[in-house]
Amino acid sequence: MEQIIDIQHLNKSFGTHEVLRDVNFSVSKGEVVSIIGSSGSGKSTLLRCINLLEKASGGQIFYHGENILDNKHDVADYRKHLGMVFQQFNLFNNHNVLKNCVVGQVKVLKRAKEEAEKVAMHYLTVVGMDKYINAKPRQLSGGQKQRVAIARALSMNPDVMLFDEPTSALDPEMVGEVLKVMKDLANSGQTMIIVTHEMEFAKEVSDRVIFMDKGVIAEEGSPEQIFHNPIQERTREFLKRTLVKQPS
Ligand code: ADP
Ligand code: MG
C-alpha cells in the first residue's frame, strides 16, 4: 500500500525535557490509525510535529517519500494536504458557519468564492450542518461546532485528517454525533490519524492502534491485538485503568 506519511526516528524536546523519543510509524492511503495513551505521553506533540505546529528536534517525516524536514521542502504546500481538528474547535468566532468553511479554501487554495461555497456546502451537508450556514459559532453546541470544524478541514480536500481528542471537550450527550461523523469518514476511505480516549470507537474504526507511553511507542498493532491481546505490561495496565467502568 502507498505510504502517505512515514515518520522515522522522530525526537522532540522542550528544553531538557524529552517528550518524544525515536518515534517510528507510517500511515498508508485509506488507513485509520488511532493513538492512545495517558495524558502527557506525547500524543498531541506528535500530531503537532506532523503538521509542523512544532518543530521536531530530530528525525524525518516523509510525505509521499520526500523528507519535509530537510529545509528544501515547501512547508506551506505540505500543510495544505493535512486537515486538523482540535479538542477546542478553533473556529473563527467572528465568521458564520459557511464562511468558516470558505476562507481557507479561498486564501490557501486560491479557489473562487463560488466554488469554495459549493465545496463547503457539500461537506456541511455530510456532517449534517447545512441548515446552520448563517449561524455564528457561539450559537452552536459543542457537538455542532466540532462537526463544522470537521467540515472546514474536509473542505480543503486533505490527504490526511489529523484529530486531536475531538470529543474530549464535549458534553457526554454530544460525543456520539461527532464520533458518528468520524466513523462515516473512516468508512469513506479517508486517511486518518486520531488521538482519542474513546476506546470503543478506536477499536471499531481503526486499522491500527498505537499505544504511547512516556514519549515512546510502547506497542502497536491491530485493534484486536492491542485491546484483547496486548503484549506489553504497560499496555495492559493502561487499558485496565481506562476501561474500568464507573459504577452506575
Ligand atoms: P498528551 O497529548 O499525550 O497529553 P502532550 O504532547 O500534550 O501529551 O505533552 C507531552 C509532554 O510535553 C508533557 O509533559 C507536556 O507538559 C510537555 N509539553 C507539551 N507542550 C509543551 C510546550 N509547548 N512546552 C513545554 N512542554 C510541553
Ligand atoms: Mg493531548
Image (cartoon, rainbow, N blue to C red):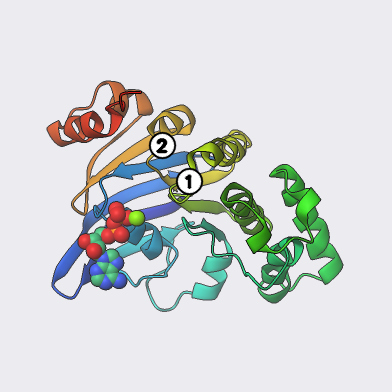
Foreground of the two, 243 or 109: 243
Q: CA distance from mark 1 to mark 2?
A: 8 Å
What residue is pinned by disc 1? Answer: 167
- Closest to the observer, 94 or 217: 94
User: Where is residue 156 shown, x and y percent of the image?
Assistant: 66, 60
Whether residue 10 is visible to the viewer of this picture, yes or no, is: no
Please name whichever residue, 90 or 195, is drawn nearer the observer in this view of the structure: 90
Horizontal placement of 246 versus 100: left or right?
Answer: left
Q: Which secondary structure, mark 1?
A: loop
Total count of labels? 2
Look at the numbered discs 1 and 2 and tell me whether their residues touch, using CB distance below 8 Å.
yes
Front residue of 96/151: it is 96
Residue 79 drawn at (x, y percent) = 53, 67
Q: Is 7 on the left-hand or right-hand side of 9?
A: right
Residue 63: give its label.
none
Give the labeled residue for mark 2.
198
Q: Residue at x 61, y 51 (%)?
A: 141
